[in-house]
Image (cartoon, rainbow, N blue to C red):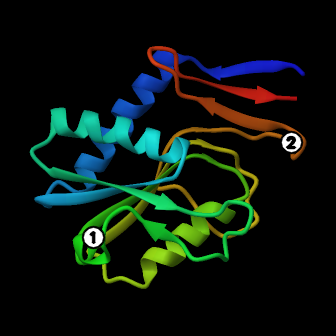
Amino acid sequence: MNHNIILNHQEIEFKIKRIAYQIYETYIDEKEIVIAGINGNGSIFAEKIASVLRIISPINIILCDVFIDKRNPQNPITTSIRTEIYQNKGLILVDDVLNSGTTLIYGVKHFLDVPLKKFKTAVLVDRNHKKYPIKADFKGISLSTSLLEHVQVVFEKDNDYAYLDE
């Protein structure tokens, strides 16, 4: 297998900082927002965005893990916090890679059952190969790839990177 690095650690850091500023700009009038990361790398990416937001803004950040069965997304979706906590607040649903859009659209569907002030999505890598009509409001990089290629994000202490498998 051939790995092509598409984002190195420093580039990912810059993308996280830019996305955090975009979120701050979008939610500047809010006192509190929820950053909901899809379990796994989405949660790690959400934590990284939240840590930058806590530095650059006075907004209170509530982190939430979203548990989706990625193999069978029709299964019930759960969150690490109660519905009442994110109800009537601004919420950003976060994942690392937007591949077909299946995980993200089922995550969006889950949150549509709750009244929210504002609802946005954020991904580090947008693959541009969607099965569903979903888009990322905040994205680190857009990448046109073939259906045979696979994007993987690795979060390691001081060595985050994203690569493309051919």
Amino acid of disc 1: Tyr
Instruction: Give the residue pinned by disc 2.
Output: 146
Total numbered badges shown on the rendered structure: 2
Pick the residue in front: 2 or 73: 73
For disc 1, the marked residue is: 86
Q: Judging from the image, what secondary structure is the residue with disc 1 in?
A: helix
Q: Which residue is found at the position 43% from the left and 75% from the top? A: 111
Q: Position of residue 101 (x, y in %)?
A: 67, 61
Q: Nearer the viewer, residue 148 or 107?
A: 107
Give the quadrant of residue 2: top right
- Determine the image quadrant of residue 113: bottom left
Name the residue: 57% across, 77% down.
76
Quadrant of the frame with the N terminus: top right
Residue 96: x %, y % from top left:
56, 43
Q: Is residue 79 left or right of residue 166?
A: left
**Sequence-earlier tag: 1 or 2:** 1
